[in-house]
Amino acid sequence: MQRMKSANQDYRPPSQWTMEGYLYVQEKRPLGFTWIKHYCTYDKGSKTFTMSISEMKSSGKMNGLVTSSPEMFKLKSCIRRKTDSIDKRFCFDIEVVERHGIITLQAFSDANRKLWLEAMDGKEPIYTLPAIISKKEEKLKP
């Protein structure tokens, strides 16, 4: 049953955007981090990434989808997040012109993350092996 629900997230319907769909965005709070669901779009031609907060409100008589005005960014880079560097699965980082630092995003599945990385020309993280590097440094020392 769960797989059937997530299958929609793995499929990319044709649209005006190179990629679009829901992603969780990691946001810093005074007591740590939180993950907020956003509806995101990406246009590869202009490298424009757009995200709008999208959450379900169940308070009072207002039941339904509440969206904010979209934030638009110009993408600089996209890198898959190392699995051992974060406690969540299916994450990737983007760097944008308008903000200092990175924005960490979480897809709903590995297949969905691969679609986002492909659309954004995402790269794999660089793994360093400290033991190999230190041995090379030792050989270089006189």
Image: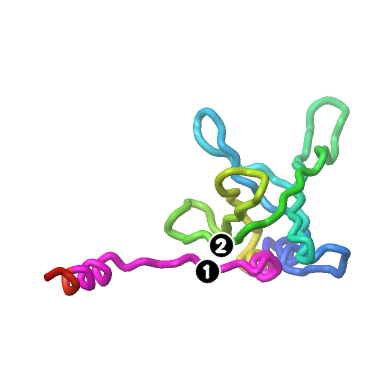
Please check the rendered image and state whether residue 122 is part of the magenta-colored stretch, yes or no: yes
**Three-letter code, disc 1:** Glu
Are there few (<14), some (14-19), or many (20+) residues within 10 Å of tag 2?
some
Give residue 133's quadrant in the image.
Answer: bottom left
**In this view, 113 is above or below 29:** below
Residue 65 picture location, percent across and down = 83, 41
Farthest residue, direction front: 142
- Left or right, residue 46 beside residue 29: right
Farthest residue, direction left: 142
Residue 124 marker: 1
Give residue 121's quadrant in the image.
Answer: bottom right
Q: Which residues are magenta?
A: 114-137
- Left or right, residue 136 beside residue 45: left
Q: Residue at x 85, y 35 (%)?
A: 63
Please check the rendered image and state whether residue 45 is part of the magenta-colored stretch, yes or no: no
Are there few (<14), some (14-19), or many (20+) residues within 10 Å of tag 1?
few
Give residue 114's quadrant in the image.
Answer: bottom right
**Three-letter code, disc 2:** Ile
Tag 2 residue: 79
Disc 1 secondary structure class: loop
Contact between labelled residues 2 and 1, with CB atoms less than 8 Å apart: yes
